[in-house]
Image (cartoon, rainbow, N blue to C red):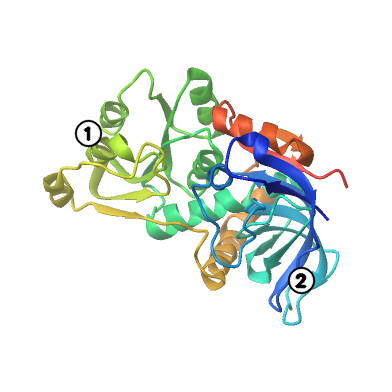
Amino acid sequence: MKAITITQPGGPEVLQITERPTPAYAANEVLIKVMAAGINRPDVAQRKGNYPPPAGAPQDIPGLEIAGIVTELGADVTRWKVGDKVCALVIGGGYAEHCPAPEGQCLPVPQNLSFAEAASLPETFFTVWSNVFDRGRLQPGETLLVHGGSSGIGVAAIQMATALGSKVYVTAGSDEKCKFCEGLGAAKAINYKKENFSEAIAKLTDSKGVDVILDMIGGDYTAPNIKSLANDGRLVFINNMKGKNAEIDLTEVMRKRIYITGSMLRSRDVLFKSTIAQNLQKHIWPLLASGKIKPVIYQIFPAIEAAKAHQLMESSAHMGKIILQWGN
């Protein structure tokens, strides 16, 4: 098979197309002919040498989400059959023509979606469900603040939380991105280059603050996040793009009874991820099928142009997902 490999740690140019053996698959896995794969920031970090893959994952083939056709079944697989169209969350190896995936981490491609659209779902939807609804315990009628509203994570969080009855505020880096986020259902998008987001949240919530914050920024965003939370608020970290260290007012944490948590999804076990998949199929997949939630794709690249796709990801100019597509 053909695969996009990281030839050495470095810039986008280190992504090269190479020939590799078709991967083996375990008893609880299916082998998928990959039609499309999503691009995510962990792929960029892995390419740079800053995010080593977990044990058992391909060490030089990135890619955490795919969509395609089941071609082989492991001995213990009962849910899928050859020919099924699925999308899947994988621990790596998604930038290839074939990729194995645990059967529990696969979901059916909704009939109204293309492979490219389906490939845009797993990494962001699994991440949002796990962190906003499981760890963050967001409830209907509560408020959510999402940093990076026009990112793949942001697009998923806006639509999922709004569809399930919450009010969503976001931050974004331009007026165009803010308008885009509000078009997806955000109650208000804050241009962080023009406004102090914690002051804006105070005005929007009559100084009450929001119930949950989904933060991929870290660093000096942490203190204003604490200010922006309501009593019993939950701050959930999924990345630390501005740094892993932060100074916070612990008195404020105690006064408001704030919960601070976070997670990394890639290293979690198959049972954990399969449980998320079950919740997504129950609560979110019907909303995709009805069109209430829609995949948002910014650009599709041929797989051989993976370097250009990574350049776009690093520019942060995109609004929505970036996808690689195999021409088969």
Label 1 sits on a secondary structure element that is loop
Q: CA distance from mark 1 to mark 2?
A: 50 Å
**Residue density around tag 1, few if under 14, some if 14–19, many if 20 or more, within 10 Å:** some
Residue 173 in the image: above or below residue 144: above
Read off the residue under disc 1. Answer: 207
- Residue extending farthest to the bottom is 76
Q: Amino acid at mark 1?
A: Ser
Q: Position of residue 16 (x, y in %)?
A: 73, 42
Q: Point out the tag, 1 or 2, that comes first from the N-terminus.
A: 2
Judge from the rendering whether residue 239 lies leftward or rightward of residue 298; answer left or right: left
Q: Quadrant of the rendered structure where residue 241 is?
A: top left
For label 2, the residue is: 80
Q: Is residue 69 visible?
A: yes
- Identify which residue is drawn at 69% across, 31% down: 308
User: Image quarter for residue 81?
Assistant: bottom right
Whole-percent x and y of residue 173?
A: 45, 24
